[in-house]
Image: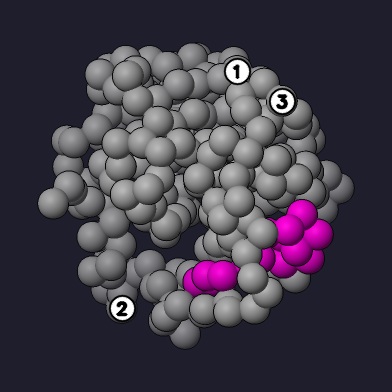
């Protein structure tokens, strides 16, 4: 397992350990970490499908809240712990090595103001499974389905807590149905595009547990690359995030 140490963002603010043979975080992870609503009242955050902890690490730049990351794969969990220690953030981030299904019974039901998740995007059978099992688990719903994730988020959240998810646009209607099935009312939605004029390839969606019906806000589109194939100003801002 060849391990490398990279800067998490576009400057040496946070470091993250990654396995070059494994599934590493991508831009959709950073978009979610920037998108999720965090307030001064946010005291506890849970990140599901944490991988090597890019979202918990990023969120330490936005909040002093306690953060719990849940990851099922031992190799990714070990890298997450290594990164947390390297950044001296073990006072704020705690990693849990476990399947997310039923995790609320172990770390606390209705105890979190915010839950985030960058989940496996593909159903088993929809796409060819990667022969690398670790990558397959990260990309396909082998160990947990989308419904498992939404159900668990609802159990983790307190009333009026927020669940933020990044996913593929072809599953938007399914996501909204599941949010409402588990009493998470969709409130914020943003469509992400690789370039101006291209088709949407990611969505960012956030809902409120036991929120009032209706009131969904569709935010302006997020464009990743400009006409020169360079990051747009907004993406650069996300990667250069700093505390005020």
Provide the residue span drawn in magenta: 174-191
Q: Quadrant of residue 221?
A: bottom left
Q: Quadrant of residue 231?
A: bottom left
Furthest toward the bottom, the residue is 197
Mark 1 or mark 2, whichever is nearer to me: 1
Looking at the picture, tell me which residue is in the foreground, 166 or 38.
38
For label 3, the residue is 105
The mark total stands at 3
Counting from the top left corner in percent of width and height, residue 145 is at 78, 43
For label 2, the residue is 227
**Horizontal placement of 38 versus 96: left or right?**
left
For label 1, the residue is 97
Image height check: is 62 above or below 103? below
Q: What's the CA distance linking mark 1 and mark 2?
A: 42 Å
Residue that appears at 39% across and 73% down: 223
Q: Is residue 150 visible?
A: yes
Q: Does the stretch in magenta take in 69?
A: no
């Amino acid at each position: 397992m060849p391990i490398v140490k990279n800067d998490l963002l576009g400057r040496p603010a946070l470091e993250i350990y990654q396995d070059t043979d494994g599934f590493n975080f991508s831009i959709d992870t950073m978009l979610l970490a920037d998108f999720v609503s965090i307030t001064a009242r946010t005291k506890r955050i849970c990140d599901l499908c944490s991988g090597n902890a890019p979202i918990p690490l990023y969120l330490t730049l936005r909040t002093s809240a306690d953060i719990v990351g849940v990851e099922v794969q031992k190799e990714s969990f070990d890298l997450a712990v290594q990164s947390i220690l390297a950044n001296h953030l073990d006072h704020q981030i705690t990693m849990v090595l476990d399947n997310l299904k039923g995790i609320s019974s172990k770390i606390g039901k209705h105890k979190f103001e915010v839950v985030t998740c960058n989940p496996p995007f593909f159903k088993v059978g929809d796409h060819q499974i990667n022969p690398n099992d670790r990558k397959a688990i990260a990309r396909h719903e082998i160990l947990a389905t989308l419904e498992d994730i939404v159900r668990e988020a609802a159990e983790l959240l307190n009333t009026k807590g927020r669940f933020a998810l990044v996913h593929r646009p072809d599953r938007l209607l399914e996501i909204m149905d599941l949010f409402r099935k588990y009493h998470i009312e969709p409130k914020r939605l943003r469509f992400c595009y690789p370039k101006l004029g291209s088709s949407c390839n990611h969505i960012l969606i956030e809902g409120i547990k036991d929120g009032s019906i209706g009131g969904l806000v569709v935010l302006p589109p997020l464009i990743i690359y400009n006409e020169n194939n360079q990051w747009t100003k907004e993406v650069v801002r996300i990667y250069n995030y700093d505390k005020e």
